[in-house]
Amino acid sequence: QAQLVESGGGSAQAGGSLRLSCAASGRTFSTYSMGWFRQAPGKEREFVAAISWGGGSTYLADSVKGRFTISRDNAKDTVYLQMNSLKPEDTAVYYCAASAPYRGSLYYEGSYSYWGQGTQVTVSS
């Protein structure tokens, strides 16, 4: 059974850094685009970042541009989200997701068919 498992969440001070990892198991996602979404308490889940299957194209939400970086290692079936200059408003549960080829816009969560269970990120001021 295909699974995505996030790790690396936790607590950080404002201005600090965290790196999230998303490891795939049960199948390879090397031909899938991968994305990160987040959901803060009382808010809808929102797009954070995405990366094409080969890693050649990346997409970032305006709110994280210049601070977050998405990357992937297909040999390890793992995608990463490096988060720098963290702000309290980055506090949320972060979800990893996989989108099969030609499923639609990577900004739209409906384009993703596999989801991880989420990892909590808490940023204090």
Image (cartoon, rainbow, N blue to C red):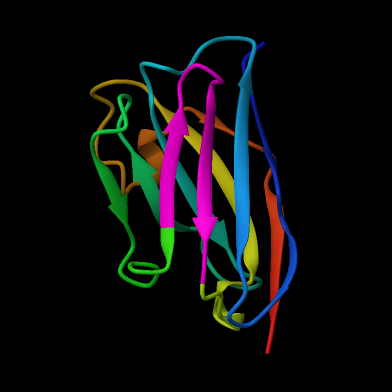
How many discs appear? 0
Question: In percent of the image, x 30 and y 25: which residue is there?
Answer: 54
99 is higher (above) or lower (below) than 45 = above
| Residues shaded magenta | 69-84
Compared across the picture, whether 90 is left or right of 49 comes to right
x%, y% of residue 35?
43, 41
x%, y% of residue 21?
61, 41
x%, y% of residue 40?
61, 69
x%, y% of residue 64?
40, 68
Q: Main secondary structure of the magenta part?
A: strand
Question: In percent of the image, x 39 and y 51: which residue is there?
Answer: 49
In front: 116, or 30? 30
Q: Tell me which corner region of the image, top left, top right, bottom left or bottom right, holds residue 55.
A: top left
In front: 92, or 14? 14
Check if residue 86 falls in the magenta segment: no
Q: Residue furthest right?
A: 10
Compared across the picture, whether 32 is left or right of 86 comes to left
Question: In percent of the image, x 56 and y 9: which residue is there?
Answer: 27
The quadrant of the rendering that contains the C terminus is bottom right
The quadrant of the rendering that contains the N terminus is top right
Compared across the picture, whether 33 is left or right of 25 comes to left
